[in-house]
Image (cartoon, rainbow, N blue to C red):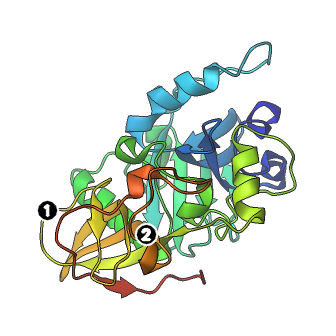
Amino acid sequence: MSFLQGQVSNDTRRLAENRSLLAAFLSPQGRVLALMQLLPHSSGVIAILPRELVSPTMEALRKFVLRAKVKIEDAGALLSVAGVHGSSRLQPEKDGYIEKDGIGVAAVNGDPGRYWVIGAAEKLAEHGVDAAPSDVEHVEQAWRLADIRAGLPQIYLATREAFVAQMLNLDLLDGISFSKGCYTGQEIIARTQHLGRIKRRLYRLQLPLGEWSVGQALRLKDGRAGRLTEVIRNTDGYEALAVLNMDASTGAADGNPRDGESALARAPDDAPVAAAGLPLPYAL
C-alpha cells in the first residue's frame, strides 16, 4: 500500500478499512494513464482495469519501484474476476470489501447492486459465478452500459493520457484525495482543482445511430466539443460518456492548452452531432 500511496490519486490507507477504492494512475503531467478499482485482497492489493492496459500499466509502475519492497505482476493466471449484478451471497456494504472462502467481493464505486467478485475460477463456480460465460461479449457490454448509467469513467488505450482526473469527474466520485500528500501528477491535479481551471467534465449522452468508438472526437449542436470515453449500443442508438467543454463558447481549444485542458479535445471539423444529454446520478 505504501508504494501505491505515492503513485495513485486516492489514499490507499483507506484500503485497511476493508473497502475498495477508485483511483487514477497518472503521468507526471497529470494525465490519466489508467483507472483502477483497488481491492485489499489477502494476497496483496489487486487492481482491476481493462486487459489492454495491464501490460503498459505494469511497465509504467515498475519505473518507480527502485528499492521499494514490492512486486508488480499480472494476477490473471491465478485469479479470475467477474462483475455481478444484483444480490451476492457475499455482499459488502457500500464501497466495502469482504473476503471469505477464497472469494473476494467488492462493491462497485457508489453503484448499489453491482459487485466485483474475484477468486480462482473453480471457487467462483462454487458460488455460482461464471468467470468465462459463453456470451462474454454481451456480459461485458451490459457491464459497460451500467458504468455509463452510473457515470463511472474508464480509460482505454485510445484515451490513455488524454485527460486529467477532474475531466473524468474523479473528484466527484471519491477517486481523488486532496489531503494524502504527494503522488505522481499530484501538482497538476491540485492546481487544476484550486485555481478553478476545470474547463471540461464527463457527461452522459444519447447518440444517434452511426459509427462511434472510444476516443472519437465529436462536436455537439450546442457548440460543446470533446471525446468519447465510453459508448455502448442501446435500443435507441448509443449511450455514451464523453468529456466535453463545459462552456459552448470554448468549443475549440487554443494552441496552448492550460492545466486541465487537452489539445486532444479540440473541436473536429465534422458536422455537429444531434446528441441528447442524459442525467448522471451525481451533480456536476
According to the picture, the residue beneath numbered tag 1 turns out to be: 211
Front position in the image: 219 or 186? 219
**Figure quadrant of the C terminus:** bottom right
| Depth check, front residue: 2 or 97 | 2
Q: Is residue 81 left or right of residue 192?
A: left
Tell me which residue sits at (29%, 70%) in the image.
Answer: 219
* 1 and 2 marks in contact (CB < 8 Å): no
Question: 276 or 111: which is nearer to us?
Answer: 276
Q: For numbered disc 1, what is the local secondary structure?
A: loop
Q: Quadrant of residue 182?
A: top right
Q: Which mark is residue 74?
A: none
Q: Residues within 10 Å of mark 1 (few under 14, many from 20)?
A: few
Image location of residue 139, percent across then percent down: 30, 59
Which amino acid is tagged 2? Leu
Query: Can you say which quadrant of the picture contains the N terminus?
Result: top right
Q: Is residue 154 above or below residue 270?
A: above
**Residue drawn at point x = 49 percent, y = 44 percent:** 49
Seen as rendered, the residue at the extreme front is 255
Residue on which disc 2 sits: 244
| Dot placed on the residue nearer the N-terminal end, 1 or 2 | 1
- Hey, which residue is sitting farthest left in the picture? 210
Q: Up-down: is 26 above or below 270?
A: above
Which residue is the extreme one toward the top?
67
Q: Is residue 102 visible?
A: no
Q: Is residue 280 left or right of residue 102?
A: left
The residue drawn where x is 68% and y is 50% is 99
Q: In this figure, what is the number of numbered marks?
A: 2
Q: Alpha-carbon distance for marks 1 and 2? A: 19 Å
- How far across and down, in percent of the image, does residue 105 sit? 60, 55
- Front of the two marks 1 and 2: 2
Amino acid type for the residue under numbered disc 1 = Glu
